[in-house]
Each structure stands twice: as structure tokens, then as C-alpha cells.
Amino acid sequence: MIGVLLLGLIGDNIAASRAPLLHRLAGQQNAVAVSYERLVPRDLGQSFDEVFASCAAEGFRGINVTYPYKETAARKVRIDDPLVCAIGAVNTVIFEDGGPVGYNTDHSGFMAAYRKVRGDAAPGTVLLIGTGGAGRAVAFGLAGLGARALRLVDRDPARAEALADALRGAVPTLDVSVWPEAAAAADGAEGLVNCTPVGMVGHDGTPLDAGAMPGATWAFDAVYTPTDTRFLTDAAAAGLSIIPGWELFFFQGVQAWTLFSGLGLDEAGLRAVLLDAQDGG
């Protein structure tokens, strides 16, 4: 029997996150009281390490981790899955008796989101902008989905090169390249992917000019607040099939809930209530 399930989210700029609502609703389905706290290190006057340690000490069952701490979190936990080790980023942590254990439901959540929209269609050649924690998870997801080639772009070329090396080591048959500029890398790409925070609440703009989008087939934005980012709006106007960041949010959250609680979900029911809440219902 679970009493109050104490959970949290560590990240910057998370005031608009729907994660607390998702997990509280998941708890309601299972008659479990859920406390899910937003934990912003700078607002608490603490470092990520201090907030993480407080969660462990204060009886949290687990936490989600978001921008910009996913790679930092990976260095503080035991990771049992070799694939997650290769990704080098975690977004879900469970506090076990033997110490914290890290998982990456961004990776599996992205694959589920992609398949929901595009079914078995192969990703093709993909431009991926942003190679931090979210980008690493999505890149390995694209590899798992059978992408032909990945073109990586990041304002920190060394970070992009590090991801390229990790991908080549894990998937030697994958064509991986690092590009200095997104518009050039978009030429001839079938998929366009944003894994930067550009476009989220507080980070207005788009990582790719609309003029570079025609000719591509599909687009995904890891940003989900707002759901209609300029990146996705421009992509839709160019005729691309859209995979909203909300789908990644939903699937990674469902999978994190299972890790946190060991309990199942009526996914269709949860989706309907979340969408209704999003629409103001």
C-alpha cells in the first residue's frame, strides 16, 4: 500500500510544467495521494547537487530532471541500462535503499511519440538541433527507429562532437555528422528536430528559419510549453507532418509514473483529462 508518494521535478524555468498535474492525475487513477514539487535550484538558493541531496534526505520516492541538469544527474546515479549509459543523461531518478538509480524515459518516450504519429515510417536523414540531455536521448531514439543519417548542430561544437562519438560507438552503421549551421544542415533532410529550449516559455524564437523547412517531411519539437511553438507552426505551414513535444511529455511521464509507483494507468483516460485541462476544460 502506497501512502503519499513524494515526487519532484528539478529544472530551470519550469513554472509552466504540466508534470505535477500528470502525476497527480495518475495518482488519482490509482487512489494514491501524490505530492509533486517544482524544484528550481536558483529559486531555492541552492546548487543542483544540494537540491538533489535534499530530495534523497527528505524521503522523495523519485524525481524527474529537466533542462539543464540531465547530464549532471547522470553523474550522480547508478545506471543499470547500458543504453542509458551511452546516452549519458537521465530524466528520471528513483531513490532506492542502495542509492539513487537513473533512467531515461525521454529516449523511450520519444520513440513512442514518433510511432504514434508516423507509425513504422523510417526517420530518414534527420537534422537534430541541440545536443544536450534531451538531444542525446532523442538522437539515440532516432537511431533505434532506423534513421539513415543524423546531422547534429549545437552552439557548442564540442558537445555535438561528443554526441557524435557516442552514437558512432553505439551504432557504427549510422551516418553521423556535425554541422556548423542549422539552415545548411536542413538542406536535403527529411526530419527536422529541435532539442534546444528555444521556443519554450521564456525563450522566444525558433532554432531554424522557416525558409529552410520546405522539402522536409516531418518535424519534432521537444518543447511542449507552449505546444504551438514557432518552430512547429512554421513546419506545419511548410507542409510537414508534426510530432508535438506534448507527445514526448505524455509518454515519458507515463513511463516515469510506472517507475515511481510500480502501478499501471488508463493511458487513454489520462490523455483525455490532460488535454481537457490544457484546453481550459
Image (spheres, rainbow, N blue to C red):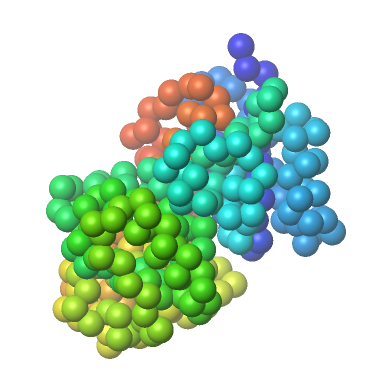
Tell which of 105 and 18 is nearer to you: 105
Total labels: the figure holds 0
What is the x, y in percent for residue 253?
48, 41
In the image, taking residue 274 as reference, residue 50 lies left or right, namely right
- x then y, percent, for residue 84: 47, 44
Q: Residue at x 35, y 59 (%)?
A: 168
The image quadrant that residue 260 belongs to is: top right
Which residue does the image show at 37% across and 80% down from the upper left? 179
Q: Can residue 231 be spotted in the picture?
A: no
Residue 135: x %, y % from top left: 44, 61
| Front residue (pair 8, 127) | 127
Q: Position of residue 45 (x, y in %)?
A: 84, 59
206 with respect to 47 (left or right): left
Decide: is 237 above or below 164.
Answer: below
Q: Residue at x 79, y 56 (%)?
A: 47
> Image quarter for residue 254?
top left
Q: Quadrant of the N terminus?
A: top right
Relative to 201, say whether 273 is above or below.
above
